[in-house]
Amino acid sequence: MGNKIIIVLCLVFFTCQLSWAQEKKEEETQAPKEEKATEAAKKEESVLKVENATIVEEKKVLDPLSPSKAAFYSAILPGLGQAYNKKYWKIPIVYAAMGTGIYFYVTNNKNYNRYRRAYKRRLAGFTDDEFQNIVDSNDALIDAQEFYQRNRDLSLLLTVVAYVLNIVDANVDAHLLQFNVSDDLSLRPHIDQNQIDFNRNLGLTLNFKF
């Protein structure tokens, strides 16, 4: 009877030892997994922090004074604001518009002064001006003066308008460069075929995600 009790106790002891060893092995196996999961979570969190920091940094890049700077640069030198906005293709347009206005201003002003001098010489009693064989009357000289004076003033006005538009364009462009359009808002063309008369219906589809 005593031997049976000893055998039973030994079996219980060995069973407990095996269970304890198994639990210890599972704990040792589980520990690295938990450490790896913790490290992965930390890495993912650090990546999210970096991405969020990058987004914040990109938002901070926007300069609220950029439109004013672009307008100021274009006011100092036409086309410089367009270069500041990196819209280099607009610079030739600016100079073509202003150059055309200046060219016609100079040409009309030159012709105006020619007829003006001839008119003054005829009033002084001279008849040796450059238009002596072309324009007979003083009234014709006056009409020519008024014509070129009107065109000269119009050319000056167009040049000033081109200069102002150059400043406005630089300012508006700088504003648009900082305008953020969300990807959650989209507008797309929509073509649908009528199932009754098979005519095509055109429309626009507005998608908004929230």
Image (tube, rainbow, N blue to C red):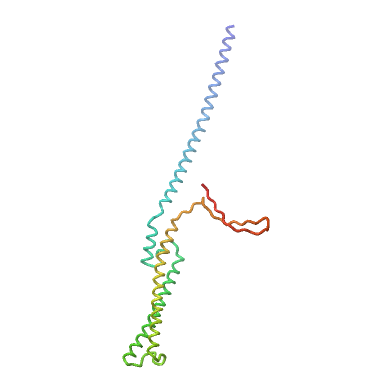
Residue with the most extreme left position: 124
Image position, residue 54 (x, y; %): 44, 48
160 over 65 or under it: above or below: below
Q: Relative to residue 69, is residue 51 drawn left or right?
A: right
Q: Residue at x 48, y 38 (%)?
A: 41
Would you identify the image quadrant in which residue 82 lies? bottom left
Identify the residue at horizontal 41%, vertical 92% (top origin): 133
Residue at 44% x, 58% y is 177
Work out which residue is located at the far top of the displayed protein and give it.
Answer: 1
Can residue 82 be seen here? The reply is no
Asked if 24 appears above or below 208 in the picture, the reply is above
Q: Nearer the viewer, residue 10 or 23?
A: 23
Where's residue 31, x and y in %? 50, 30
In the displayed image of the protein, which residue is found farthest to the front?
196
Image label count: 0
Q: Quadrant of residue 201?
A: bottom right
Any part of residue 120 in sight: yes
Task: Please name whichever residue, 28 or 72, is drawn nearer the observer in this view of the structure.
Answer: 72
**Can you give x and y, in whole percent of width and height, for residue 23 in the image?**
53, 24
Q: Nearer the viewer, residue 47 or 152?
A: 152
Q: Nearer the viewer, residue 10 or 77?
A: 77
Is residue 187 toward the left or the right of residue 68 in the image?
right
Instruction: Name the quarter where the N terminus is drawn.
Output: top right
Residue 184 spot, x, y in % from top left = 51, 50
Q: Is residue 54 above or below residue 196?
A: above
User: For residue 62, which quarter of the picture?
Assistant: bottom left
